[in-house]
């Protein structure tokens, strides 16, 4: 399981780095979204702070995962991110659910493989 966890950690970390950097540098095109999804994303973008804040969380968590430092902290930061990516795609854009599911599954797999470092939270 160790090599699987390492691959999962790198995959999730690299994905977070790429998508976090995209929040600042906009090098990936925005996908065509259904009207309700576009309105929701437009409202978040209109706040002026949500996407930069998400970018910082993505980049920080991605760096921690790739560098294998404070992995439980990085995974904890990504739980609400993973949940909201899945919830967004279930509610507004189901065609993108595959990537959302991959992010959530990688996060859950890594939490499972690091469970000994999390279980004290539930004592």
Image (cartoon, helix red, strand yellow):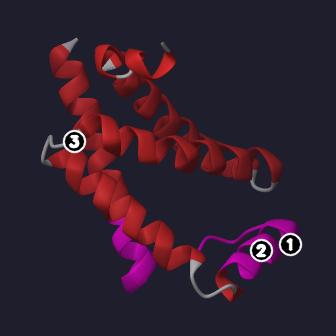
Classify residue 3 as left or right of residue 83: left
Cα separation, mark 1 vs mark 2, equals 5 Å
Q: Which residue is mark 3?
A: 70
The label shown at residue 35 is 1
Residue drawn at x 57%, y 46% as measured from the top left: 80
In the image: residue 90, left or right of residue 16: right
User: What residue is rendered at 22% in x and 50% in y?
Assistant: 64
Is residue 29 visible to the viewer in this orientation of the structure? no
Quadrant in which residue 24 is drawn: bottom left
- Element type where label 2 sits in the image: helix
What's the residue at 32%, 53% (across, down)? 61
Residue 101 place in picture, x, y as percent: 56, 36
Res 84 visible? yes
* Viewer-proximal residue among 27 and 82: 82
With 41 as the anchor, is 113 left or right in this view? left
Tag 2 residue:
38
For residue 41: magenta? Answer: yes
Spatial separation of the CA atoms under disc 3 and disc 2: 35 Å
Marks 1,2: beta carbons within 8 A: yes
Tell us which disc is closer to us: 3 or 2.
3
The magenta segment: 18-44
Estimate how packed mark 1 is, as few (under 14), some (14 to 19) or many (20 or more) residues with alpha carbons within 10 Å. few
Q: Camera-side residue: 52 or 122? A: 122
Q: Are marks 3 and 1 in contact (CB under 8 Å)?
A: no
Relative image position of residue 38 (x, y in whole percent): 77, 74
In this picture, is 76 found above or below 96? above
Q: Residue 107: where, in percent of width, then height?
A: 43, 33
As drawn, 101 above or below 111: below
């Amino acid at each position: 399981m160790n090599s699987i966890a390492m691959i999962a950690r790198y995959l999730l970390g690299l994905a977070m780095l790429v998508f976090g950097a995209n929040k600042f540098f906009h090098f990936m095109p925005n996908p065509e979204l259904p009207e309700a999804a576009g309105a929701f994303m437009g409202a978040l973008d209109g706040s002026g702070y949500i996407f930069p804040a998400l970018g910082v969380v993505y980049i920080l968590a991605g760096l921690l995962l790739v560098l294998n430092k404070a992995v439980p902290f990085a995974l904890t930061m990504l739980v609400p991110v993973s949940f909201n990516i899945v919830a967004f795609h279930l509610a507004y854009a189901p065609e993108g659910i595959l990537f959302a599911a991959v992010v959530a599954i990688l996060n859950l797999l890594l939490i499972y493989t690091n469970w000994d470092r999390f279980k004290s939270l539930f004592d």
